[in-house]
Amino acid sequence: MLLENLRLHNFKNYKSSSLTFSPNLNFIFGENGNGKTNLLESISMLCYTKSFLQNSENECLKYGEEGFEISGQFKNAADSLNKIKLTYKNDTNEKEIFYDNEKVTAKNEFIGKFPLVVLSPKDTKLTTGSPQERRRNFDLLISQISRVYLRDLRSLNRVLKQKNSLLKSNLVNKRYSKTELRDMIALWNDEIIEYGVKILIRRLDFIEGFRDYLLESFNKIVGSSYIPVINYESDLLEMGLSETPDFDLIRSSFRELLDRKMDFEISRGISMVGPQRDNYVFRMKKDGELFDVRIFASQGEHKTFVVALKLSEFEYINDNLENSNTGKPILLLDDVFSELDKKRIKKISGILTDYNQIFLTTTDYDYLNILRDNFKSNFGAYQIINGEPQFVN
Amino acid sequence: MQTSETLEKVAEELSKLPSIGRKTAHRIALYLAKSSPQDVISLSDALLSLKDKIKLCPLCCNITEIEPCAICDSPKRNKDTICIVEEPTDVFAIEKTNEFKGVYHVLHGIISPLDGIGPEDIKVKELLSRLSGNVDEIILALNPSVEGEYTITYLSKLIKPLNIKISRIARGIPVGTDLEFADEITIAKAFEGRITL
Ligand SMILES: Nc1ncnc2c1ncn2[C@@H]1O[C@H](COP(=O)(O)OP(=O)(O)OP(=O)(O)O)[C@@H](O)[C@H]1O
Ligand SMILES: [Mg+2]
Ligand SMILES: [Zn+2]
């Protein structure tokens, strides 16, 4: 997939801008606070329907304006062109998406049509932050290759919201007796099991396949001195289950756990069981020692892990797309070089030509010299000054 | 800009309507203020008669101007088969297919704790009182949402002991599409392929 051009109107600090892009490297530079990240954010909105920084639409609206519009033309692997337009109006707080000028009603069906991998400074949270950050990251990844997964995930989240709402409100208003409440919760639990098992199995299947990709991209960046390890942790797996997925076994231990914790959930007023509490754990083996990345890795090692992770996401998505016409994901690299030593920067610059279309931001124009060695003339450079992009020769 | 309290009040009321934002509400209020008195009176009369004339059918709970409603009253309809739907608009959608010859029961909502709606808040009691009569089959035609699934399981647990055949319409209707928006062929197919619970 390629993004051929982009138009922004009242998006963050952009007034009205039009850009045409290179199918290879797009080098975006400028001083702090001028709109480089904002530009990447607008691209993620077109591809994901949402900002990768989880900003609300209202937060993306240029100060004092009433609505924004982002539109772009994509070209897929079969050379067919699609125009995507996203509009937001703060009056109704409504976001609308148009696919070739036709309004998209089911936004779920849209995810994965324009696959995207984003690496941003915020991604340090992947190795340092809470399990939620990692779940969100991999949920988005798997959703881009499996619509069924996205649907199940949305359903599970909805069921959990309903169940939590029932638990919480009954704590306050005591509308239902304990027996009545138990019966009602049991019915929500049926749905949690139905969607939860599917999600768990899909995640295990994903991890199984993803490991090799991670290993490979580590190898490309730092050689074989590090070996990354990724594992899935879940209460459900601790109940004597192996990571080999077995629907019936997981289903029955899931039910057992839900039954066992029900009174606890009722007294606490919140759900305590399910894949919404699981964790992905990152470890690295270096000099024969296996250590937890979150706790022991250095600043640069964190960054290296995240860069390798994102590059392997690219390959994984590319190999697992539902529709082969889609073509390779687009890669957004926000400030990718900061915190890395010269050797690693050289290494990464060297392998970037293996990817598809790239949008790379930096405050440092000099990096272009390193990249030019690899990309030759296959790039476009843009300077962003105060929300005004300028094509640079 | 100078505003009027009356205009504000009308705009405020209008903005409570579905998919009408603050700005649109203002535009409509202003438009009404400039319209002829006859137009405004006929609009307000129409609105009032909504509340005056429209009632719920004592049997199926569908909206109606006569009691019981035309469907419940029709000798051509098979009273042994009841199709359960969420909203009156669903009855309308199914009637368009001309496939279903039984009668309906409109729940007026769906179980959803997030919206503060429990089983007591929808027409479940009214349904159960109908089931003491001669009912052979219940068809659950609820939307395939998380709440729809829940309501289906909830109702089938209630109905099961009564020895009535229960089925749900097939899931031919794409997830995320409301019954109201599905086309006639899809709905008809969903009825044909219904699944016994
Ligand atoms: N809704 C908005 N309307 C107008 N301007 C905004 C809005 N949101 C953010 N900005 C402005 O955008 C600027 C930040 O842009 P951005 O994050 O893209 O900078 P950057 O070029 O990536 O900088 P850095 O090099 O520091 O990462 C800030 O100055 C901020 O005030
Ligand atoms: Mg930035
Ligand atoms: Zn009736």
Image (cartoon, coloured by chain):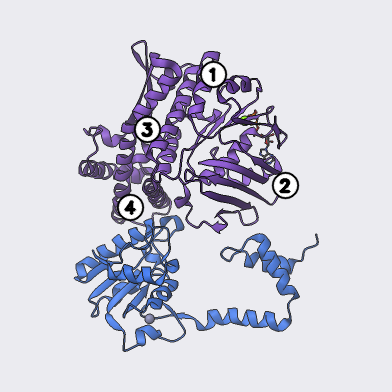
Chain colours: A purple, B blue
Judging depth in this view, the residue of A222 and B145 nearest the camera is A222
Confirm or deny contact between disc 4 and disc 3 (CB under 8 A).
no
Task: Name the kind of residue labelled 4 in the image.
Answer: Trp
Q: Tell me, yes or no, whether dots 4 and 2 are on the same chain.
A: yes
How far is mark 4 from mark 3, CA to CA?
23 Å
**First along the sequence among labels 1 and 3:** 3
Quickly name the residue at label 4.
A188
**First along the sequence among labels 3 and 2:** 2
Q: Report the side of A114 relative to A240 (left or right).
A: right
| Residue A284 place in picture, x, y as percent | 38, 19
Quickly name the residue at label 1.
A345
Task: Name the kind of residue labelled 2 in the image.
Answer: Gly
Q: Secondary structure at mark 3?
A: strand
Determine the residue positioned at 29% across, 51% down. Answer: A190
In the displayed structure, A5 sits above or below B13; it is above
Of discs 4 and 2, which sits in the foreground?
2
Task: Name the kind of residue labelled 1 in the image.
Answer: Ile
Indicate the chain on which mark 3 is placed. Answer: A
Q: Tell me, yes or no, whether dots 1 and 3 are on the same chain.
A: yes
How far is mark 1 from mark 4, CA to CA?
50 Å
**First along the sequence among labels 4 and 2:** 2
Is residue A131 visible in the rendered image? The answer is: no
Quickly name the residue at label 2.
A64
| Residue A278 place in picture, x, y as percent | 36, 35
How far is mark 2 from mark 1, CA to CA?
40 Å
In the rendered view of the protein, which quadrant contains the C terminus of chain A?
Answer: top right
- Badge 1 density bin: few <14, some 14–19, many ≥20, Cα 10 Å: some
